[in-house]
Image: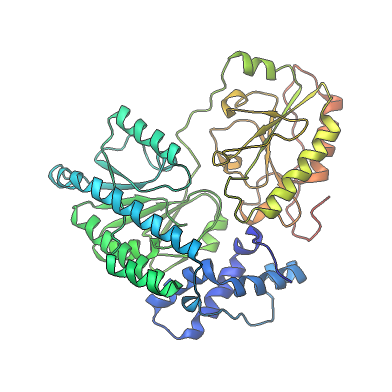
Amino acid sequence: MSFPEMPLVRQTTVFVQRLITACRRFSESKYRLHRRVNWSYRYAAAFYQSEASYLMSDIDTYLAGDCLVAPQVENVYAQKLSWKQAGVVLLKVFAHWSFRLLGRFADRRIRSNHIQNYRKAYVDDIELVFDITQSSVIRAVYPFPISFRRQLRYLNFLRKKGYLFKLAGHSYCFRDLLNFVLRRDVESLQRMESRAQILHALEVAALGVRNVQLSDEFDIGSLDFARTLARRHVHVVNSAHGVGKYLPVHAYAEFHILTQRQKEYYFMTHPCNFVLRKLNEKAPAVATSDASSESLMRYSICFVLLSAQSSRGIGEKYLVLNEDRITKLLGDEFENNPEIGLYFRPHPNNHTPVVPRGFKLLPSLEQVNNLPNVIFASFNSTCQIDPAFKGRKILLRGEMMYPELWFDDNEEMLHLDQLVALLRKLALTACKSEAVPAITKVTPCLHMNGGN
């Protein structure tokens, strides 16, 4: 049986620990072992399938780390890539070459101004995880293939604010690229990527900066980049991209995390200072007073589903299934209920959202933020721990969706049927002049029944 890509599998600490154990059989140096773990995490399809089968057969035993079958991982470096995958790599290399060429003109200014902090950026979200007002910062903007428009908006923002920035790209060698095209396997891709990251780290260190700030735990080359910078005595600080967990092995000197779950998950090659931070701590919580917000106040309960579906749709089978299930349940139950307004907020990276029946599109969260009658719900949105968003926030459990793997136990978590029951109760007792009452939080648990 073939299992689809499920975040539930990859997000577990057990999966990572078993992957590291399996990779040790290749008897490599620590340097190569750590690199192999990350590349196997991304490309070892057979290992993923076997681990998914163990988890599906007995999820409680697997998550407890009591699976008795020894983990086995294939040699991913021998794996051939499709021509489509090779084409994506070529586009990435050309984009980095272009950004790198255009950005070289700013390097002299960085040295002459003795800039101390190098902030690796793609789009505006980097400004939410590091101090936007910090002095002596150069923002190095790298290619962002997910949304070219969003990157253009970020560049325009930097220009208008007068922040010092440059375009930047990794140092891919033409010989490595030619070798990759001829061989088209993971080993040649890994060599090209690792060498590019190492060379680029040396170039960044040569600029004279003392600190590098990034949010790159999803980048396959981040391990080589950070390790090389550390050898040049450059302090590397990574701030978690969100509550999700990505490539497991890293070499950051400092790692700003959002949950204790992340600290348990990541394997650090060197001593690392983990700092638990608040998401968007400096962002204000402001509710607008325009007509759209006032219209929302006519409901006793304003329910907002924060969708996590993106336009790419990679690994989102169970997310789509569960979001479709909850929107149908709520639409059938509350579409014509005058006490409850159902709103749908699509993910920023979903460029063609489809609003479910019974729901209204919410163009901006500011329309409902800090209103007394709002309830936010999601399966894994970082808004759950974002203090900038004010309102009651609920994490949903569903089929193969366990928010306790992402979030700590102090968050409110409900099964889908429990959410429906809660809204039904609130609709019966709500008064338009009252805020949403609180209820006792449900103790997190792990079992196969998604509560449907």
315 shown above or below 82: above
Chosen colour scheme = rainbow
Residue 90: x and y in percent read 39, 59
The residue that appears at 32% across and 62% down in the rendered structure is 197
Of residue 410 and residue 220, the one placed in the foreground of this image is 220
> How many numbered markers are drawn?
0
Residue 86: x and y in percent read 45, 64
Of residue 100 and residue 439, the one placed in the foreground of this image is 100
The residue that appears at 54% across and 63% down in the rendered structure is 265
Task: Assign the N terminus to one quadrant of the image.
Answer: bottom right
Quarter of image, res 399: bottom right
- The answer to whether 211 appears left or right of 261 in the picture is left
Residue 23: x and y in percent read 51, 79
Q: Is residue 124 visible?
A: no
Quarter of image, res 254: bottom left
- The answer to whether 44 appears left or right of 33 in the picture is right
The residue that appears at 69% across and 75% down in the rendered structure is 66
Residue 46: x and y in percent read 61, 75
Q: Residue furthest top?
A: 291
Q: Is residue 92 visible?
A: yes
